[in-house]
């Protein structure tokens, strides 16, 4: 991982422990995505995520147990044993959206916005003061 000296490494993994990864704590953006794809991928109202260049995330354990759902330019990386979502490859394959819930420690950058709120779950109310955007807002 080509990380700066100030970017501490973070560790993450799946629920059963079969797959582990490392990522620099150098997220470029962090947000809560309410799109239907993220809601279905997580089974929840939204996906809290950190965006980082793809090359800054690497598998450290269980590469042979990874399940990739999608194509090269856009896919989810999951544990093939327990199904946990670890991160998604997006933006023509250049970026990773790390599922914050799969990290062992809190990242330095907290979500700053809600995106795709036009398609948010109708049963969920956003109650924090973060800005809300109907679609994707490019960082």
Image (cartoon, rainbow, N blue to C red):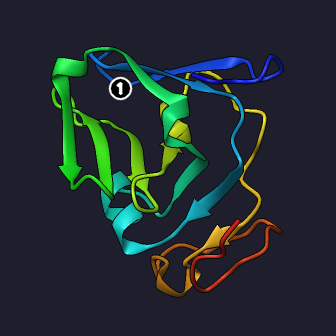
User: What SS does tag 1 mark?
Assistant: loop
| Image quadrant where residue 39 sits | bottom left
Quadrant of the drawing holding the C terminus: bottom right
Of 24 and 15, nearer the camera is 24
What residue is shown at x 60% (from left), y 49% (from top)? Answer: 51
Question: In this orientation, which residue lies closer to the viewer: 136 or 110?
Answer: 136
- Position of residue 87 relative to residue 38, above or below, is above
What residue did someone put label 1 on? Answer: 14
Q: Is residue 77 shown above or below 70?
A: above
Q: Quadrant of residue 53?
A: top right
Give the vertical position of 124 relative to 102 (above or below): below
Q: Residue at x 71, y 48 (%)?
A: 28
Q: Position of residue 89 (x, y in %)?
A: 40, 50
The image quadrant of residue 7 is top right
Q: Is residue 79 left or right of residue 133?
A: left
**Residue ranking furthest to the front:** 2
Residue 45 in percent (x, y) is at 47, 64
Image point (78%, 74%), residue name:
131
Relative side of 136 to 54, left or right: right
Q: Position of residue 112 (x, y in %)?
A: 77, 59
């Amino acid at each position: 991982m080509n990380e700066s000296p100030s970017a501490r490494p973070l560790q993450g993994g799946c629920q059963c422990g079969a797959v582990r990864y490392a990522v620099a704590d150098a997220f470029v953006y962090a947000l809560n995505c309410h799109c239907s794809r993220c809601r279905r991928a997580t089974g929840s109202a939204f996906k809290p995520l950190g965006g980082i260049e793809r090359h800054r995330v690497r598998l450290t354990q269980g590469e042979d147990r990874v399940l990739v759902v999608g194509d090269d330019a856009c896919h989810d990386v999951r544990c093939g044993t327990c199904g946990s979502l670890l991160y998604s490859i997006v933006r023509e394959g250049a970026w990773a959206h790390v599922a914050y819930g799969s990290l062992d420690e809190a990242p330095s950058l907290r979500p700053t916005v809600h995106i795709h709120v036009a398609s948010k779950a109708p049963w969920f109310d956003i109650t924090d003061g973060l800005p809300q955007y109907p679609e994707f807002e490019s960082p």
